[in-house]
Amino acid sequence: MFELNPQSLTGLMLVGTAWAFLRADSRSGTSRALAVGLAAAGAAVFANLVLARLLANGPLPAWAGALVVPEVVAFCAVFEWSLRVRATIPAGQLRTRGGDVALRLAQALVLLYGINGWRQPELRVRDFFGGLSGPGIWSNEVLSLFVAPLTVAMVLWTLSMLLCLNRNPDRAERVRLVAFLVAIPILAVGLVLPLDISPAATVVGVSILLGGALRHAEVRGRQGQFVGRFLSPQVAALVNRHGLRSAVPDERREVSIVSVDLRGFTAFAAARGSDAVIALLRDYYDAVGAAVHEFEGTIKDYAGDGVLVIVGAPLPLPDHAARAVALARRIIEVVTPVTRTHCPDGTLGVGAGVASGAVAVGIVGGQGPLEYAAVGPAVNLAARLGQRARAGEFLVGADTVALLDGDREQLEAREAVSLKGYDAPVAVFGRSLLSVT
């Protein structure tokens, strides 16, 4: 049985921290690697306590060398975590092989340290650990067997993490990397410091580690709300694998825009109570969201009774125009029953507008909520057409129709319309689905 002392408490703290990381994101290989590293570090604390007691009672038994294993596992797992984090950060034109090789070399050096510790456990615990607490200088043997491998391994790990920061990762990842860059060396030193002072280093290291992880989780949580609300499941999967900025970059993209509005909503809201209005909007948003996900679109924003959808960004879709037209039709098909349920007299309906063109897209938002912004003439045209469309109708701009390759969904050429913000009448095609039931 172990006494409840500072050493055993720090071991339990490391194991508890490992459990917390694993529970927070057990499906992530990155989190699992870190949890293994922290749990092994906790086990290493207890292993070193055993070594110290064995040495105090006489010569070490033959199996004592195996007590170096948790320490080796801890270092190797943290280096593995670093490799997996590096794989999630976009590198652009930078070469990343050097940093990855450095981490593999660091793992090899830790294995060398472990082999030496297995073969000479007494030298490791008496002269290596003991040398840190006394005024003496390590012998050349201790330097070559233990000090040099661990020191070079940590230098290689630090270099690799600095190269990661050089890739300009998103804010959440940068916070975590900086915290870990400070905390991991402190934890590493805590593993090899004399037992009477190692708990202090461990507590400081764990505190910094948790601080960085909590801040990372806070930012990722806001990103997760953004992902779940606006992005398709396919894009959400990319975000989980590669990070938000990598999966959703700032760029200029050829896309199609679908703008949806409820007809008669103002009168409906004035005549009904707030509960009825919220119930309508809840069902309306659910129906539109399901249709958008079906066609792999991205919801730019909800604004009262209006919804603006991007088709073709951030997930590139060569057939974005055809999908957008089909999406507009689908939205009218699924929303019309919703409006009839909430307003049986038929004064409430839904219309949509579709336009295509080059737009600038990207994520905006700092400390507050995130938004996927899209700026370009196609966004404005889709919004104007959506406002102009009657209940059960969707209007389509000429640029979208030109991209349909003959598959025009039985669109009808309409008379050119005058729209706010346009000097000349705009060519429009449309389709009425008033027969939808």
Image (cartoon, rainbow, N blue to C red):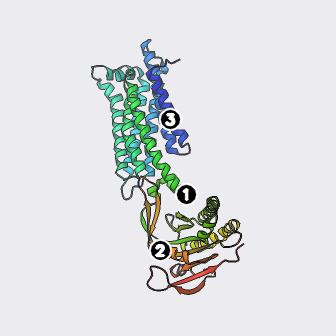
Mark 3 falls on what kind of element?
A: helix
Residue 252 vs 402, above or below: the answer is: above
Name which residue type carries label 3: Ala
Q: Mark 1 and mark 2 in contact (Cβ < 8 Å)? A: no
**Residue furthest bottom in the image:** 415
- How far apart marks 2 and 3 lie (CA) works out to 50 Å
Name which residue type carries label 1: Arg
Percent position of residue 34, x then y: 48, 39
- How far apart marks 2 and 1 lie (CA) works out to 23 Å
Residue hosting label 2: 380
Quadrant position of residue 233: bottom right
Residue at screen point 42% across, 39% down:
211
Q: Nearer the viewer, residue 108 or 286?
A: 286
Residue 338 vs 239, above or below: the answer is: below
**Tally of numbered discs:** 3
Residue at screen point 50% across, 37% down:
35
Mark 1 falls on what kind of element?
A: helix
**Disc 1: CA contacts within 10 A as few (<14), some (14-19) or many (>=20):** some
Q: Which mark is residue 327?
A: none
Residue hosting label 3: 18
Depth check, mark 3 against mark 1: the one in front is: 1
Q: Nearer the viewer, residue 312 or 148?
A: 312
**Disc 3: CA contacts within 10 A as few (<14), some (14-19) or many (>=20):** many
Q: Earlier in the sequence, mark 3 or mark 1?
A: 3
